Image: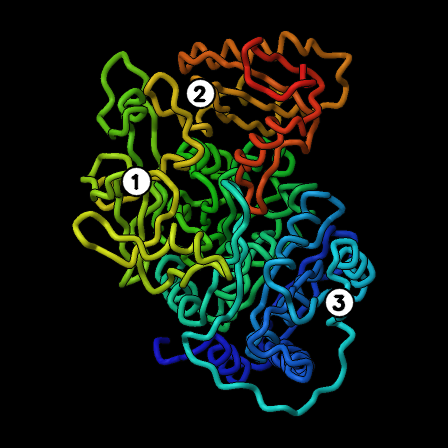
Amino acid sequence: MTGYRTFTEVFTERAGQTPDRVALLLLPDSDERGRPATVTYRTLDASARRLAGRLLADGAAGEPVLLLHASPRQFAVSFLACLYAGAVAVPVPPSGGHSHHEERVAGIVRLTSPRVALTDAALAPDVSRLLARHGHGSVPCLAADAVSGGTGLPLPVLDRDAVAYLQFTSGSTGSPHGVVVTHGNLLANQEALAELLGAGPGSRIGGWLPFHHDMGLVGQLLHPLWLGATSVALSPEAFVRRPVRWLEAIGRYGIEVSGAPDFAYDLCARRVTDEQLDGLDLSGWRVAVSGGEPVRAETRQAFVERFAGAGLRPEAMRTAYGLAEATLLISGGPAADGELTVDAKALENGRLDAPRAGRPAHTLASCGTAAGAAGQVLIVDPDTHAVLPDGEVGEIWVRGPGVARGYWRDPAATAERFGAATADGTGDLLRTGDLGALAGGHLHVTGRLKDVIVVAGRNLYPQDLERTVQRVSTLFGAGSAFSVPGERERVVFVQELRTHRRYALDLEELASDVRRCLTEEFEVSVAGVLLVRPGTVRRTTSGKVERSAMRRLFLNGGLRPVYQYLDEDLPVPSGRR
């Protein structure tokens, strides 16, 4: 596969070799809505060429083109059309009616100044109004599924350095940035994925991840098309409404490779009923990838135990680590390999020490080894830039052909993250902003550098606090732990309630239980507990809690709790008490 210059060359060859093979298998939102829709390689290629001709006629070659699609079929057509035309695809989620989503889309439009916005005919009026509301009414809004005919213009000849698309980061730790992904980056990451997944042209690969997100785009749409395989797509909404739909689809439609963030496996293990379990067949699920957010060993174990009776094999589980700045995959491997149980107190001090009798222990999942022949993972002291030995926690730095060139029109942010050098002179490295350690070649991710809560010299990882609080009550949904500034760091916890029946609950007692739990488990005093309605805790498209966004909302008075406890000396804006 190394002889190709662009992803377009790979796909057009696949379309020529097997034109009648199914490229896309699009599942209905519910079993009552009919049979799956199929799109062959011939049809997908022809549709993409037709739209590419329109883009070329509109002068979009080399220019950003916004993609806002609810239809996975039309997203695939529009994305490939951009590659064919040499345009720069900019996938973004449809607004969905939420103000923060609309603000995100408007910010991306402001940064990229797209030549055109491609969308579905059904969404075109809403997208046009969104653009106009934010002062971008001059950007043409094209209903891509209504384009007919072609211009006959020749497709441009591109090389590996040509920009394929911009992947806007999820914004879990700050403002989103547009990662500049070249065709070379994309092809290199596809090679790495092939090593991890071991799929072939006859495979069915897919799931419910949205295509505008890097894990859904690169792993569940582009990888099967790169292989000449079939991409199977279930809508994210169908999974959220009924998580068992994901597992049913794997058995019913012969999906061999599927993946999702850790929270999805946890959700299935907790919410799939015994009755639903009886109807599942997961024996054909050869590779089940967990990635996109911190992977928990406890989740893997619970998932395997829950679905072993449905034919799930423990060896099917894979763990992976990656991020948009590296196109997608950085490391991966069998989930059971390299799991490590360490002393919890030593971990707070940045060391992976063996557990000691009578002291708390913590099991760290392995995220495998560096992916791709040219990939490299280092653990580096974020202050001195010294490379740390095995067993010590530091910032994860990586390099390889899948690492992108930087952020779109943001030289300051690019200089901060890309092209870093260690104290011993090893250069051209990407600073991930994640914390982790190496042990026996396996990467163990422990948290985010900016999310770490430092209390009395101890490093507390917010995901550990959040996971512990989940055990306090069955009424608890998503939670977010973060620190707020002051003379000393203060811990604040925002916790969603799964029920709207606020008057039937003892909210003061629930808040006290949260404080008591964290004091007992982590010896930390919690300065604030806010109980909030479902949907308040911000999450990225991959399920990561946006702790920085939650901190900003708290400090700016943007949260509306149904109950709150705040220490008297907690530094919060006036009017919040």
Picture layout, residue 158 above or below residue 558: below
Q: Determine contact: label 1, label 3, CB under 8 Å.
A: no
* Residue beneath disc 3: 138
- Which callout, 1 or 3, points at the residue further toward the start of the chain? 3
Picture layout, residue 390 above or below residue 18: above
Give x and y (percent) for residue 456: 35, 16
Q: For the residue marked with disc 3, what is the amino acid?
A: Ser
Q: For the residue marked with disc 1, what is the amino acid?
A: Pro
Instruction: State which mark lies toward you, 1 or 3.
Output: 3
Q: CA distance from mark 1 to mark 3?
A: 44 Å
Residue 489: numbered disc: 2
Q: Residue at x 28, y 35 (%)?
A: 393
Instruction: Pick the residue in front: 280 or 486.
Output: 486
Instruction: Pick the residue in front: 92 or 425.
Output: 425
Q: Residue at x 72, y 43 (%)?
A: 99
The N terminus is located in which quarter?
A: bottom left
Give x and y (percent) for residue 277: 59, 38
The quarter of the displayed image where residue 329 is located: bottom left
Label 3: few (<14), some (14–19) or many (≥20) C-alpha neighbours in 10 Å:
few
Give x and y (percent) for residue 304: 45, 38
* Residue beneath disc 1: 382
- Could you tell whether 492 is left or right of 382 in the image? right
Label 2: few (<14), some (14–19) or many (≥20) C-alpha neighbours in 10 Å:
some
